Amino acid sequence: MGRDEKATSIAELREKLGDARGAVLTDFRGLSVAELTELRTLLRKSAVEYKVVKNTLAKLAVKDTGLAGLARYLEGPTGIAIGAADPVAASKAVSAWARGREKFSVKGGVVEGRVVGPREVAELADLPPREALLGRMAGVLQAPLAGLSQVLSASLRGLANALDQVRQKKEGAA
């Protein structure tokens, strides 16, 4: 690989990581070509790109950026799953594929420009989908309003019941 190719590779990786909303660094040591192809196919379905990188070039790509903390995870064979649209898509897809595979491991990652370790990547992968979280939040926001509505309508119901009893008493007396 010549200087120009290396410079292009560094610039391309820097741009992809800079634009990424989420990325996961993996150690693919011991995997077959068929397994890597299966992983790439699964990731492509989730709109995530998987790229095998040279550690020295990757370290140069993250140097002097907000992602400089990734350098500590760039040891041994490294593949990077990069998701541009969804910050947790790469974490979910990689973690789902990695279950039951001893040879494959997650080294670390990036979420919304923040470097995270393997434990945080696993925690992100275990999060429910965005729609479910929004539904839970809507329920939490709705609960106090529903309670307030019931409290306010209870006094009106009580007044209506009292007036109805007075009406029944007057009709009974007449």
Image (tube, rainbow, N blue to C red):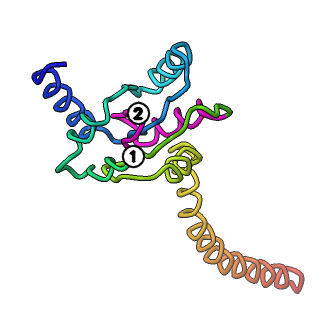
Find the residue positioned furthest to the left.
4
Tell me which amino acid carries mark 1. Answer: Tyr
* Circles 1 and 2: CB atoms closer than 8 Å: yes
Residue at 37% across, 33% down: 82
**Which element carries disc 2, helix, strand or loop?**
strand
State the residue position of label 2: 78
Q: Earlier in the sequence, mark 1 or mark 2?
A: 1
Identify the residue shown where x is 44% and y is 46%.
108
Q: Residues within 10 Å of mark 2 (few under 14, many from 20)?
A: many
Q: Residue furthest right?
A: 172
The residue nearer to you, when weighing 55 against 94, is 55
For mark 1, does the 10 Å Cα neighbourhood hold few (<14), some (14 to 19), or many (20 or more) residues?
Answer: some
Bounds of the magenta segment: 74-99
- Side (left or right) of 116 relative to 16: right
* Residue sticking out furthest to the top: 34
Residue picked out by circle 1: 73
Quarter of the figure with the C terminus: bottom right
